[in-house]
Image: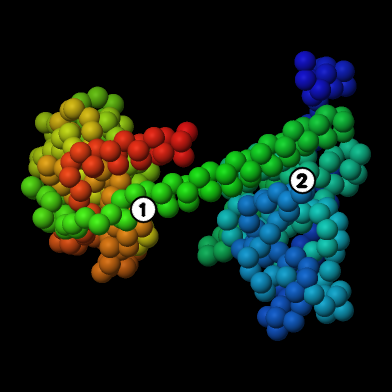
Amino acid sequence: MSKLETLINTLCPNGVEYKELWALTAWDKKFNAVDKEKQKRILRYHYFLASDLKPLIVEGGNVKILTTNTSSLYTTEELACEYLSEGEIVCIPWGGNPNVQYYKGKFITADNRIATSLNTEILDNKFLYYYLQNQLDVIATFYRGSGIKHPSMQKVLGLKIPVPPIAVQREIVRILDNFTELTAELTAELTARKKQYEYYRDSLILEQNIEYKTLGEIATEIYRGSGIKRDEVTQEGIQCVRYGEIYTTYDIWFDKCVSHTNEEKISSKKYFEHGDILFAITGENVEEIAKSCAYVGNDKCLSGGDIVVMKHNENPKYLAYALSTTDAQRQKSYGKIKSKVVHASVPSIKSIFIPLPPLDEQQRIADILDKFHSLVTD
């Protein structure tokens, strides 16, 4: 039995009481925005705007809020003193997107609701923070107004929070702090792995003294898919891919589709088969436009609109890896039309050039990168 289970069984075997936040917490919006001239002159204390609420960063076992906005840090205490506070607080943005953050120390703030426990022997502030984090979906429904939205504090204060004995709260906080720290460490490790993989992938593919060819030269056929509407996606039927799934669902290669459709109801059918490369030619940003992947399954599938299908006689996995390199992505981003969305085209895809070694070397490289990619994404 864990320490937490022991504490619960000993201190609150019959459950815990729930209380409304207004009975346990003090809330304040003490500060107006500090003018920009003072922001430039003072650099030491944390200054919280709604836009400054960032994901938590763990340093030395302490959870802190860090901001990349240099105008949000203050140094001259005499200038900051009329705005300066110190304590253990939880912030909810007063305008902006629903978010909750915890902070302990000196701070200056504006445009937030600041909460703190009335009695930390009854309600631990970090426990309050984790509870509010768990209620973000509910808090999001409290935001009202046009333009910059604000939460209804009447509804926030009406939230009911479980109030176990303080020893139970602190043990829950300790466990969640450990998870937060482990998550930060794991995220850093995965980021480092990803960078290592990208460097090795680019080195393996690009640092070869071999001929480069354009996709127009490599392709035996290249064409656009045809639209499959969201309401035409079904649980059964022929497998299909819609362009957004290339960004959200499929990685370098895939062998099964997550979506299906009724083939008889699709008026203009565009198919793809084993080995074909799929490009998403509509996206939200230049950096990811024309993301591509290889289909290595054995079924005949339907391609949705805003997808380009490329047929070829090369190793499909090698092409998919080559088209994911930094150099290939740079080429994909050339000459795109920026509006609410970013677009690529068949001619722009045909102009992308990649190194093309013999088929046996393509297979060797694809096998190596498959192993490395598995390690990174495991």
Q: Residue at x 18, y 41 (%)?
A: 359
Q: Can residue 349 be seen?
A: no
- Residue 348, by quadrant, is bottom left
Between 67 and 263, the one lying in front of the other is 67
- Residue 189, by quadrant, is top right
Q: Which residue, as the protein is rendered here, is positioned at the far bottom?
A: 37
Q: Mark 2 points at which residue?
A: 61
Q: Can residue 375 be seen?
A: yes
Q: Where is residue 146 in the image (x, y as percent from the top left)?
A: 53, 62
Q: Which amino acid does label 1 sit on?
A: Asp
Between 211 and 50, the one lying in front of the other is 211
User: Considering only order in the chain, which callout, 1 or 2, is on the residue closer to the N terminus?
Assistant: 2
Say the numbered circle drawn on residue 1.
Answer: none
Give the crowd class for mark 2: few <14, some 14-19, many >=20 residues within 10 Å. few
Against 328, is 298 above or below? above
Against 139, is 173 above or below? above
Q: Position of residue 332 (x, y in %)?
A: 28, 60
Please report contact status of discs 2 and 1: CB closer than 8 Å, yes or no: no
Q: Which amino acid does label 2 sit on?
A: Gly
Q: Mark 1 points at which residue?
A: 202
Between 272 and 370, the one lying in front of the other is 370
Quadrant for the N terminus in the image: top right
